[in-house]
Amino acid sequence: MQDLLPELCDQFEDLVQVVVPMFKSFGAKERFSGEIVTLKCHEDNSKVRELAGQDGTGKVLVVDGGGSLKRALLGDMLAEKASANGWEGIVIYGCIRDVNAIGSINLGIQALAAHPMKTEKRGLGEINQEVHFGGVTFVPGHFIYADNNGVLVAPHPLLLDEP
């Protein structure tokens, strides 16, 4: 498989923003990209569940979990739901769980770490607000690209086969 991010950085150096290296790839899909949908939540994955249940065709969910390493914002059941609804991937500034099961789901997933504890369900979270972490501002409607080299964002599609 070709390394996408180095190529994009070479071609669009002045356009892209590269996230500080911090994420680990967990999903079966190592390379993914799409339109950004954001969610800001803290140790509550209620809104992750809500968004995973919606059509995510051509989109990547970017979850700002505040970098919390105390609870997992995504498990195998929500990852399966997101995959079934067409999401390209999920980037979580926080933790996931069910690592072995998630490794077989056809979904790109990058997160800080794994943690076995589930979240509380309080129904909290802000959808499609600009979020900032890793030295990058994630703007809903902009585009995100991820592979084993890292994560980067751009204000518009960089690949020919994107909308």
Image: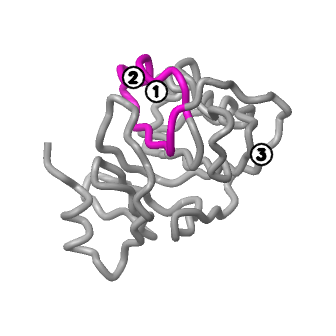
Stretch of the chain drawn in magenta: 96-114
Label at residue 7: none
Crowding around mark 2 (Cα neighbors within 10 Å: few <14, some 14 to 19, many 20+) is: some
Q: Position of residue 100 (x, y in %)?
A: 41, 19
- Label located before the other in sequence (1 or 3): 1
Residue to which mark 3 is pinned:
125
State the image quarter where residue 133 is shown. Answer: bottom right
Q: CA distance from mark 1 to mark 3?
A: 21 Å
Label at residue 83: 1
Residue type indicated by callout 3 = Gly
Q: Which residue is at a point 28% across and 78% down the rendered structure image? A: 13
Q: Position of residue 68 (x, y in %)?
A: 66, 46
- Label located before the other in sequence (1 or 2): 1
Crowding around mark 1 (Cα neighbors within 10 Å: few <14, some 14 to 19, many 20+) is: many
Label 1 or label 3, whichever lies nearer to me, is 3
Answer left or right for 76 relative to 109: right
Tell me whether circle 1 and circle 2 mark residues in contact (CB < 8 Å): yes
User: In the image, is residue 3 above or below residue 122?
Assistant: below
State the image quarter where residue 153 is shown. Answer: bottom left
Residue type indicated by callout 2 = Ile
Residue to which mark 2 is pinned:
105
Q: CA distance from mark 1 to mark 2?
A: 7 Å
Badge 1 marks a residue whose secondary structure is helix
Tell me whether circle 2 and circle 3 mark residues in contact (CB < 8 Å): no
Q: Position of residue 25 (x, y in %)?
A: 37, 40
User: In the image, is residue 117 above or below residue 151?
Assistant: above
